[in-house]
Image (cartoon, helix red, strand yellow):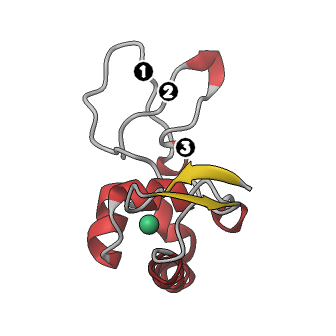
Amino acid sequence: MEIKKCARCGNFFETVNDVCNGCIPKDNKDVGKLKNFLNGYGYLAENMTRGEVSVNTGITLRNLNRFLQWNDFKAYNIPENLNIIVGEDVVIENVNNVGKNIKGNKKVLEKI
Ligand SMILES: [Zn+2]
């Protein structure tokens, strides 16, 4: 086993996990909340920012960003920001494309 820094509390510990033993129950609780939230909202959750999901679930943005990289949540594309000012070379398309690269490598940055 290797020495790692806990992704929640920052303590160093020996493990194969991302978080220390003390934080595993907290992670499990947050993941349960996130699953319930996403099951309730389904893909409508993609119309929210990560900040809004964080406020609604009580999960910190840092932990939320970590969970959303997990396979369990890979199906969801929850953008970090829907309200960025749009420049002239930015295409606005369907809200479901927010944050994704579309034609010509232009990014969809605003909710319409
Ligand atoms: Zn910890």
Observer-nearest of 72 and 83: 72
Could you tell me if residue 47 is visible in this image? no
Residue drawn 40% across the image and 34% down it = 109
Residue drawn 41% across the image and 13% down it = 89
Q: Point out which mark residue 107 bears.
A: 2
Is residue 94 shown above or below 35?
above
Could you tell me if residue 15 is visible in this image? yes
Is residue 86 shown above or below 74?
above
Q: Position of residue 33 (x, y in %)?
A: 46, 83
Separation (CA) of disc 3 from disc 2: 9 Å
Dot 1: within a 10 Å radius of its alpha carbon, few (fewer than 14), some, or many (20 or more) residues?
some
Separation (CA) of disc 1 from disc 2: 6 Å
* Earlier sequence position, callout 3 versus callout 2: 3
Residue at image mark 3: 97
Observer-nearest of 43 and 55: 55
Q: Do the residues labelled 1 and 2 touch (CB within 8 Å)?
A: yes
Q: In this view, does 37 lie to the left or right of 70?
A: left
Helix, strand or loop at label 3? It is helix
Displayed-image quarter of ligand 1: bottom left
Helix, strand or loop at label 1? It is loop
Report the amino acid beneath label 3: Asn
Which quarter of the image is occupied by the N terminus? Answer: bottom right
Observer-nearest of 49 and 58: 58
* Earlier sequence position, callout 1 versus callout 2: 1
Is residue 97 shown above or below 10?
above
Q: Is residue 84 left or right of residue 8?
A: left
Separation (CA) of disc 1 from disc 3: 13 Å
Residue at image mark 1: 90
Q: Position of residue 59 (x, y in %)?
A: 36, 70
